[in-house]
Amino acid sequence: MLEPDGARPPLRRRITAHTAVGIARLLAHLSPKRLQAILRVLRRGAPPADHATALRARQDVTSVSTLCSGRYCLPRSLATALLCRLRGTWPTWCTGVRTPPFAAHAWVEADGRRVGEPEDTTTYRPLLTVPPQQPHRRRRSARSA
């Protein structure tokens, strides 16, 4: 169940949200290539996040960080994805652009929908995404057949 608007999450959720925000602030300084590589490692073994789980993570992140509750979408999206991962799931992390006028944005998606984003963000086209990892099928080798 989500808290009413403006309500603070319980202490335990605030602590993990602060942790995710701190890590996100560090990751936000990396190059896109390195950031994508790190996020691909972090998503390993996590099932896809559902929309409610990702929305709760986003709300927890924005409730503990003025940086993330403002216009800084990259740390907010990273912190949301990291918080989902700390809780055992992974949303699709995205960053993209729109034109005209040119603008860049970062967000998370779950269940095929953008999480907590205003309607006008649908004009952004993804350039980099890190979706949940697809389970690998084990192939039987000729020797084991």
Image: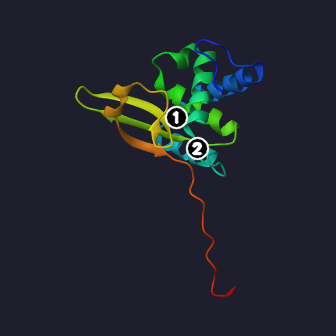
Is 62 on the left or on the right of 97, as rendered? right
Q: Residues within 10 Å of mark 1 (few under 14, many from 20)?
A: few
Amino acid type at circle 1 is Leu
Q: Nearer the viewer, mark 2 or mark 1?
A: 2
Up the image or down, 65 lies above or below 128; here it is: above
Q: Residues within 10 Å of mark 2 (few under 14, many from 20)?
A: some
Q: What residue is shown with label 2?
A: 38
Q: Position of residue 18 (x, y in %)?
A: 68, 22
Work out which quarter of the rendered image holds the C terminus and state it: bottom right
In three-dimensional space, the C-alpha distance between marks 2 and 1, rounded to whole angstroms, equals 10 Å
Identify residue type, mark 2.
Answer: Ile
**Residue 27 seen in the figure:** no
Dividing the picture into quarters, in which one does residue 119 lie?
Answer: top left
User: Residue 36, image x and y in percent?
Assistant: 51, 43
| Callout 2 touching callout 1 (CB < 8 Å) | yes
Determine the image quadrant of residue 2. Answer: top right
Marked residue nearer the N-terminal end (2 or 1): 1
Judge whether 126 appears above or below 101 on screen. Answer: below
Tell me the residue at 43%/43% (across/down).
128
The outermost residue toward the right is 12
Q: Residue at x 65, y 39 (%)?
A: 85
Q: What residue is drawn where x is 22% and y is 28%?
A: 100
Q: Residue furthest left?
A: 100
Colouring style: rainbow
- Please state which of residues 102 and 125 is positioned toward the viewer in this rendering: 125
**Quarter of the picture holding the N terminus:** top right
Rendered location of residue 48, percent (x, y): 59, 47
Q: Secondary structure at mark 2?
A: helix
Provide the residue designation for mark 1: 30
**Residue 117 at x, y percent in the picture:** 44, 27
Q: Secondary structure at mark 1?
A: loop
Looking at the picture, tell me which residue is in the foreground, 78 or 109. 109
